[in-house]
Amino acid sequence: MLVDTETYIVLDPETIKELGLLEMPYAVDLLLTDGRRIRARIFLAEVEVKGRRGPAFVAELNVPTPLLGEHALETLGFKANPRTGELEETSPEGGYLL
């Protein structure tokens, strides 16, 4: 799985079906790296990273490799360090309350 610093989790339709994810009544417009704009259906999933669990949105797109999006990482209190390839803690588990 790759980490994408700009998007949601992205999975192909077959994986979404296998996982039995809940489809949301929304779609999002995404800008692909090749410049194309597409509309993708959105699903709800539970994710776990380094022992932390929480909700995350999943965009449906035919991709050869699943993408773990920055939105899910931020929800769990992490960010990807592009220099080291490691995940860094940015907030305590559960995040901050304002």
Image (cartoon, grey):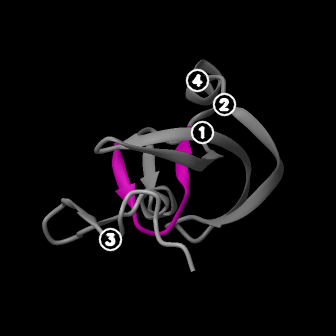
Query: Given this view, does label 1 or label 3 mark the residue nearer the observer?
Result: 3
User: Which is more N-terminal, label 3 or label 2?
Assistant: 2
Q: Please determine whether, in this image, residue 88 is positioned above or below residue 26.
A: below
The alpha-carbon separation of the residues under discs 4 and 3 comes to: 29 Å
Query: Given this view, does label 4 or label 3 mark the residue nearer the observer?
Result: 3
The alpha-carbon separation of the residues under discs 4 and 2 comes to: 6 Å
Q: Is residue 4 magenta?
A: yes
Magenta range is 1-11
Report if the CB atoms under discs 4 and 1 are less than 8 Å apart: yes
Mark 2 burial class by Cα count in 10 Å: few <14, some 14-19, many 20+: some
Mark 4 burial class by Cα count in 10 Å: few <14, some 14-19, many 20+: few
Left or right: 37 in relation to 47:
right
Kind of residue sitting beneath label 4:
Leu
Image quadrant in which you'd find residue 93: bottom left
In which quadrant will I find the N terminus? top left
Query: Given this view, does label 2 or label 3 mark the residue nearer the observer?
Result: 3
Number of the label disc, if any, that sits on residue 16:
none
Kind of residue sitting beneath label 3:
Thr
Q: Is residue 46 magenta?
A: no
Of residue 51 and residue 72, the one placed in the foreground of this image is 51
The alpha-carbon separation of the residues under discs 2 and 1 comes to: 6 Å
Which residue occupies 32% across, 41% down? 51
Kind of residue sitting beneath label 2:
Leu
Which residue occupies 54% across, 73% down? 97
